[in-house]
Image (tube, rainbow, N blue to C red):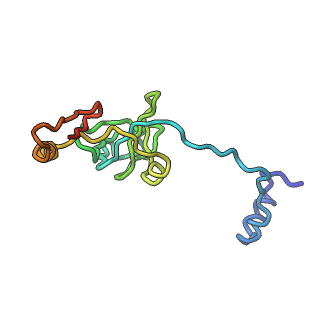
Amino acid sequence: MPQADDPGLAMAQSMMSEELKKQFAPKAEVEMPLYERHKRVHALKIAHVEHLRTDTTTDENPIVRIHFVELGFAPIEMNLRGKPTPDVGWYYVVYEDGYKSFSPAKAFDEGYTFVGPKQRPTIAQLKEILNKAEEDTPITIHADGSISA
């Protein structure tokens, strides 16, 4: 039986058509274990990525400044060593143990459901609630910052 590093085997494989390669490719006999996500994470959608060190082919510690879609969050600078390079529309993700990473939007949106916090009302929304409320209507400010009348 030829070994994987056999030059004759390598030559024969290089001459094979793609169809033959598929036929003779090793096949998995059992399915890999399957997992579901069940962690809660904090995440912000990425609006813009500045590459502060742009030559990532020679720089072992590329650094980026990330700006977010959500208002009220300052840009962060992050060393990408060992992490994927984020892109606009991706998510900056912080796990419960403090680990920080990035996730492409499609994978994140398919794997996570928004749970909070609810967006606090704007001044215009507060004025609208107050204008619609009758004089004796109680106004409730909830723990999440939302208001109802």
Number of numbered discs on residues: 0
Quarter containing the C terminus: top left
- The outermost residue toward the front is 136
Where residue 96 sits, quadrant-wise, is top left
Where residue 147 sits, quadrant-wise, is top left
Q: Residue at x 47, y 27 (%)?
A: 97
Where residue 62 sits, quadrant-wise, is top left
Name the side, left or right, on which 145 lies relative to 12.
left
Front residue of 149/93: it is 149
Q: Relative to 22, is 121 above or below?
A: above
Name the side, left or right, on which 43 lies relative to 18.
left
In the image, residue 33 lies at what x, y percent? Answer: 69, 44
Q: Relative to 34, is 39 above or below?
A: above
In the image, residue 10 lies at what x, y percent? Answer: 76, 59
- The outermost residue toward the right is 1
Q: Relative to 105, is 66 above or below?
A: above
- The outermost residue toward the top is 97
Front residue of 31/130: it is 130
In the image, residue 88 lies at what x, y percent? Answer: 34, 52
Q: Relative to 27, is 80 above or below?
A: above
Name the side, left or right, on which 2 lies relative to 38.
right
Quarter containing the N terminus: bottom right
In the image, residue 25 lies at what x, y percent? Answer: 76, 60
Q: Residue at x 12, y 43 (%)?
A: 134
Q: Residue at x 78, y 66 (%)?
A: 23
